[in-house]
């Protein structure tokens, strides 16, 4: 599909030599490609015409592609002309009771979807890609007479239901973060009310921390209450959340007695950055910089990420950590298939 | 306990294999030692509430397995029933994936027939546990309902349910408050709707996305009309659903008939369009054949004929794509890629918690209870045991309802093993009704200085007053 080019900023012509795999089979005999790349306010547009020798057109066919503004793959000599580059999320998770606890009072949820583009007559345009979206959620149950997994599991279930019921619809909008944040805050309030009603009825005391991340493409939205953490690991290990914990006591959580609204923040991930959500049992025994050493670097396979999470957890156990350990991570992959 | 053939049940039935686990008990395949015939046996506790055998004895043997014997031994009750040679809808889903639309419609209509026959009995019986695991299809393709453990008789307009399956039970069946838990025929409509959702979408409504994903989002082949029927059957409010199973059955049967007619209609229309296109091409070819060379007027006519042909071709292609898209329905707006949810919270949410709470209450006898405030502010108690020293036996104790409050009476949550730093007063709140005693209590509070080792003790006597525990 070709969109009108407005406000052309730059136009580049070049003659490049490409291999067979850069183009589809129609052009496999072409050795030279004359291509033009136009940069406008809408993004890059490139046109490539296979030529036999310089100045002489071999075939009348040409391919036109549009690429994301930051994507350089449609520049002269780049592959994927005529196809949109897909972004994919790669995820891994670790959930362990630990060596000393009888139950795992942590709960987590990891949901990934692809927001499809609709065709002219409806239907999902599978071949035209779509934006990946995800929900990452960790909850750590605390205190009370019944076991903490009741509160954390309830919060995880309810917020996952919200994601499928309302969250995905909100995330489809172009500027999605504010509206989604409002809807997510309302969901937190509902969870809080249900926990309070249950506590009053059963005369018990339960609560849970909750750190939730909604990711769409490169953007993310974070809601946080308690002492679980979210990290953005790239060239630096950045902690995104503040612990609501002071003087030995938890000051904020989801539950009847210390509820205030969660912290809300949004941001943007880099392509090689990793978003990690974890409970206190996972991060407490890890020194600063440890997570960066584990998760920053070259392209990492999904299996490696799980092994590194497990390694970090085992390191914590070796340091004497006794609590339950939970961690969920998400990474952007520039192009390729979904797992 | 009779199991694994070591001791035949009632001296008559030898256990061959275990078929599965139901909500209330286990199900085995057994052999009748006298008749040499295989039966199904369901084992439940003798004190288990439910009226499964009463219901099964009344129900028509064409819908569900007949109950042929009941054996009680060693605290268990064994219900001996017909063996159904087939597989459940759940097993089929695991093996083959979701059902096709036509198959699902037939299953839905058969389910409605089965449950309708229960509703027409006197007094009516509500099934209340319709889900793929409880519907079996035998080798002849006949549908059977199994597991009547949740079935209840309806006396009057409504009934009180005794259990529920998460994801398939209607919201009114899952109410936490027993007074609000009332069911009727519309609860069975919900169960049938959820079962249709599961077999069409291939997704378990008890797992994420919890039935929130629309059928047409998850599976584009499902017609919009069927999606609307399933959606209306599974509304949260009973008054918004089909009011009877009969109404639901009528909708499903109507859709089945409509599908047949639609298929014929589209086929005719598509054939007609292609015929028109072929006719136009043939006419254009005839026209070209008559063209003399070099006549400008002829070229104009030829061009008009060509444009007409092109328009017809475009119209035919457009029409076909439109009709295909309309047949497919609305199409997907998102595609689920991965769903993981891990928790040790048991399914069934609050009802299970209530059970735990009641169980915990019954464990503590009416004796003197000792409460200890451990380091870091967590209190642990041992019901009915006298402990030597303030911290003996704490490690394995339960968390007690000793609540810590600060000077402004706000509750504090202190992590086990950590130190609560404060310069204000700390209050310990103990709920008296949890002791469950009628006599005077002695409550001891012991504290030990961590550095000095000095001990501090406080003793108070507490007498529950009338009205304090609700009496």
Image (cartoon, coloured by chain):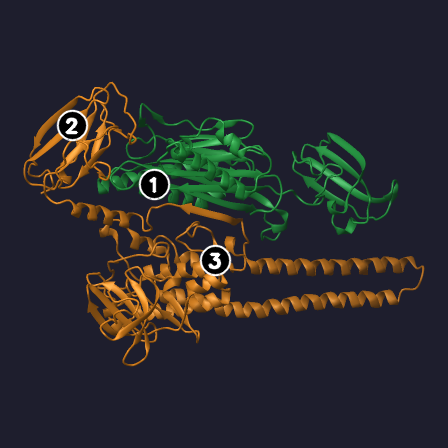
Q: Is residue B454 visible?
A: yes
Q: Residues within 10 Å of mark 2 (few under 14, many from 20)?
A: some
Q: Colour of chain B?
A: orange
Marks 2 and 3 sit apart, C-alpha to C-alpha, by 60 Å
Seen at 35% across and 26% down, the residue is A245
Residue B201: which numbered mark, if any? 3
**Front-most of residues B400 and B352:** B400
Marks 1 and 2 sit apart, C-alpha to C-alpha, by 29 Å
Element at label 2: strand
Instruction: Please give the residue where the numbered disc 1 appears in the rendered image.
Output: A105
Marks 1 and 3 sit apart, C-alpha to C-alpha, by 32 Å
Protein chain holding label 2: B
Residue B335 x, y percent position in the rendering: 53, 50
Seen at 83% across and 66% down, the residue is B285
Q: Is residue B123 visible?
A: no
- In the rendered image, what is the letter of the chain coloured green? A
Relative to B269, say whether B202 is above or below: above
Protein chain holding label 3: B
Instruction: Please give the residue where the numbered disc 2 appears in the rendered image.
Output: B446
């Amino acid at each position: 599909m070709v969109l009108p080019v407005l406000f052309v900023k730059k136009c580049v012509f070049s003659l490049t030599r490409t291999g067979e795999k850069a183009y589809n089979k129609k052009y496999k005999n072409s050795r030279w490609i004359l291509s033009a790349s136009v940069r406008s306010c809408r993004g890059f547009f490139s046109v490539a015409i296979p030529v036999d020798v310089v100045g002489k057109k071999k075939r009348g066919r040409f391919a036109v592609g549009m690429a994301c503004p930051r994507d350089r793959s449609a520049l002269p000599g780049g592959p994927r002309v005529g196809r949109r580059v897909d972004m994919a999320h790669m995820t891994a998770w670790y959930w362990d009771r630990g060596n000393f606890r009888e139950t795992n009072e942590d709960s987590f949820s990891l949901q990934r979807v692809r927001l499809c583009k609709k065709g002219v007559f409806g239907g999902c345009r599978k071949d035209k890609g779509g934006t990946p979206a995800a929900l990452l959620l960790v909850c750590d149950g605390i205190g009370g007479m019944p076991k903490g997994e009741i509160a954390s599991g309830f919060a995880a279930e309810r917020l996952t239901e919200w994601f499928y019921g309302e969250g995905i619809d909100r995330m489809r909008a172009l500027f999605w973060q504010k509206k989604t944040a409002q809807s997510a805050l309302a969901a937190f309030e509902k969870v809080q009310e249900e926990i309070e009603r249950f506590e009053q009825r059963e005369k018990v005391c339960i609560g849970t921390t909750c750190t939730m991340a909604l990711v769409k493409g490169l953007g993310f939205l974070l809601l946080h209450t308690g002492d679980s953490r979210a990290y953005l690991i790239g060239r630096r290990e950045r902690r995104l959340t503040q612990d609501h914990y002071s003087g030995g006591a938890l000051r904020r959580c989801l539950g009847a007695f210390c509820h205030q609204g969660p912290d809300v923040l949004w941001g943007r991930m880099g392509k090689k950055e990793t978003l990690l959500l974890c409970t206190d049992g996972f991060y407490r025994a890890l020194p600063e910089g440890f997570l960066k050493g584990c998760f920053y670097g070259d392209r990492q396979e999904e299996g490696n990420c799980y092994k590194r999470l497990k390694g970090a957890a085992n390191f914590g156990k070796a340091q004497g950590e006794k609590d339950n350990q939970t961690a969920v991570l998400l990474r952007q992959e520039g192009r390729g298939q979904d797992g | 306990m009779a199991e694994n053939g070591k001791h035949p049940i009632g001296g008559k039935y030898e256990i061959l294999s275990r078929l599965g686990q139901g909500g209330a008990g286990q199900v085995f395949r057994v052999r009748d030692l006298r008749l040499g015939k295989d039966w199904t046996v369901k084992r439940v506790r003798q004190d288990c509430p439910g009226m499964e055998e009463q219901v099964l004895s009344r129900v028509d043997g064409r819908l569900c397995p007949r109950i042929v014997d009941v054996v009680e031994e060693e605290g268990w009750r064994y219900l001996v029933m017909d063996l159904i040679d087939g597989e459940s809808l759940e097993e089929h889903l695991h093996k083959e994936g979701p059902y096709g639309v036509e198959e699902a419609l037939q299953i839905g209509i058969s389910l409605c027939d089965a449950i309708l026959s229960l509703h027409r009995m006197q007094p009516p019986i509500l099934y209340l546990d319709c889900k793929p695991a409880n519907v079996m299809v035998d080798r002849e393709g006949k549908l059977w309902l199994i597991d009547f453990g949740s079935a209840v008789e309806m006396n009057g307009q409504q009934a009180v349910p005794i259990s529920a399956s998460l994801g398939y039970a209607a919201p009114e069946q899952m109410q936490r408050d027993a007074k609000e838990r009332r069911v009727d025929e519309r609860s069975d409509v919900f169960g049938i709707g959820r079962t249709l959702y599961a077999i069409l979408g291939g997704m378990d409504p008890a797992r994420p996305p919890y039935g929130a994903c629309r059928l047409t989002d998850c599976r584009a082949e499902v017609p919009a009309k069927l999606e609307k029927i399933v959606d209306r059957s599974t509304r949260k409010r009973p008054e918004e659903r089909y009011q009877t199973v009969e109404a639901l059955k009528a909708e499903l049967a109507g859709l089945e008939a409509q599908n047949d007619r639609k298929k014929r209609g589209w086929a005719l229309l598509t054939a007609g369009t292609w015929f028109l296109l072929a006719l136009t091409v043939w006419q254009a070819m005839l026209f070209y054949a008559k063209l003399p060379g070099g006549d400008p007027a002829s070229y104009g006519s030829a061009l008009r004929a060509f444009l007409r042909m092109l328009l017809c071709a475009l119209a035919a292609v457009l029409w076909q794509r439109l009709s295909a898209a309309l047949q497919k329905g609305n199409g997907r707006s998102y595609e689920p890629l991965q769903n993981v949810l891990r928790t040790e919270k048991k399914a069934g949410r609050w009802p299970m918690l209530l059970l735990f709470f009641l169980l915990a209450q019954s464990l503590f006898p009416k004796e003197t209870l000792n409460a200890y405030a451990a380091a870091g502010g967590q209190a642990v108690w041992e019901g009915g045991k006298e402990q030597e020293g303030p911290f003996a036996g704490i490690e394995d104790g339960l968390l007690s309802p000793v609540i810590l409050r600060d000077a402004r009476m706000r509750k504090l949550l202190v992590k086990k093993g950590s130190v609560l730093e404060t310069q204000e007063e700390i209050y310990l709140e103990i709920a008296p009704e949890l002791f469950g005693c009628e006599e005077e209590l002695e409550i001891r509070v012991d504290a030990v200085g961590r550095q000095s080792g000095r001990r501090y003790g406080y003793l108070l006597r507490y007498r529950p007053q009338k009205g304090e525990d609700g009496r």
